[in-house]
Image (cartoon, rainbow, N blue to C red):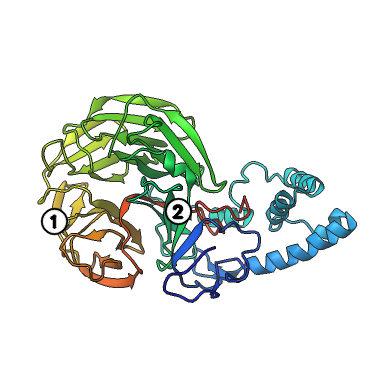
Amino acid sequence: MMTALGFQQGYTCIYPHLPSIDLAPTFGSWDTSNATLIIATAPPLETATDDENGNRDTISTGSELIEKGKQGLANFLSSGDRTDLKLCRENVEYYLASANRLNHKQLENVCHKFIQECGMESDRRVCLVCQSLIDKRNSVNNNPNLYHKDTDLKVPRYQIMFPKDVNSNETEGYVLVLDIRSAREIQKIGVKKLTKFGTGFTACTAYVNKCPYVFVFGGSGKHEKSLFRYDVVENKWNRFAHLKNTHYKHIMAFVPLQKAVYVIGGKGCGVIEKCEVETGHCTELNTSLKISVHNASSAVYKDKIFIFGGKTIRNHVWSVQVVDTTKNTVSKLRDLPFDCSGGQAVVVKDKIYIAMENGEMIRYCPQSDQSETCAKQPYTRKHFSMFEKNGHLNIVGGVRTDGCLEHEGTMYTYCPDSDEWRATFTFTRALPIHTSCTIDFPKECPVTPFRKMFGYC
């Protein structure tokens, strides 16, 4: 059962567009037996959205839809008359999910027939409430690197963190899932598939028709050349492709303009491989890194992948390398002010911010190849994760390397405008992170990564 560390059991957790649920006595039909809530708060139930002109549009809440759906479902199961369902575009996915749970073929056939009649079958991977909001705001985001980096906190965004001890002798691996909207809740979710991945694997997020996937590759192990894909919406894994080379402690990056995931370098390796996320076609580029590095930081800006520092077999590296995915070339740029290994790099507007394990923060301009130092982090740490939220950078997880344990579980936020750090929240324990990635949903959607709620939204 899900437990909250630092809180009494029996609290109520409210998810956007879902009814409140008393977690102590029951979890209803949700499969939460493999989840642990490390820290929790209850975000408010949203009932309205702003359009691009700032006007308020009232929408049906999840609780209203579900309550009406329950009544319609009960009437249908009693009478067998499809008119009792009062099918519409807003409730058909609820009924279909109910049919799957109940293994009710008649209800499933009714739903599929309605979907075909309404022309909804072209893209059922995102619920129709989500899709209507996508269509309204398609023109808002013109940056191909940013999917939903606006200030609309109703949009689900999750930081997926694979713990440092993911390859321990535990019988089941697990991931840590942080809801970025509140940034006060981390769920520890068991994922058996992780036990198949070798030490030193890397993960990244990619998108196909705006739907999110997590790609995992590499490390030393049985499946070291297999590229695995996790379907976030359907909560399913599959072996997506097979690469030519092995990579260990390497770089993985998704370039939207190329619709491809790039696997770059690794320990003793300078090879660059490309996998198209729509077809699974893999190729090895005719170029390679100027310096073969592992444990490097990376960030995607337009059609380029910037690689910061890293390690060779013998030394730490100060260099910046850039992979031009349009020209298929690699260039070595100016050195950084410090050697950089094991840190994190995140794009904010037109700058790349690199948080280093030695406590330094660097602002890098990809247009001019200029870098400058920012305010130091509150303390030095390693094995951490970093994500962007509303133009600010947030560092979570990691272990201190200055010999002090105080505030080791504290998440800190950096403001680029004021060049200041502040403590935002303290988790109950340190969380060393092996690799991480950020998932952006198209719009409101009650699906938590690695947890199957309703199947489809």
Give coordinates of residue 176: x percent, y percent.
Answer: 41, 56
Task: Label 1, secondary structure: give it.
Answer: strand
Give coordinates of residue 282: x percent, y percent.
Answer: 40, 26
Give coordinates of residue 412: x percent, y percent.
Answer: 28, 67
Q: Is residue 339 visible?
A: yes
* Pointer 1 residue: 372
Amino acid residing under circle 2: Asp
Question: Which residue occupies 70% across, 55% down?
Answer: 89
Disc 2/disc 1 C-alpha distance (Å): 29 Å
Q: Quadrant of the C terminus?
A: bottom right
Q: Quadrant of the N terminus?
A: bottom right
Residue 105 occupies quadrant: top right
Task: Label 2, secondary structure: give it.
Answer: strand
Q: Please tell me whether residue 276 is drawn above or below residue 38 in the rendered image.
A: above
Question: Which residue occupies 18% across, 65% down?
Answer: 379
Amino acid residing under circle 1: Glu
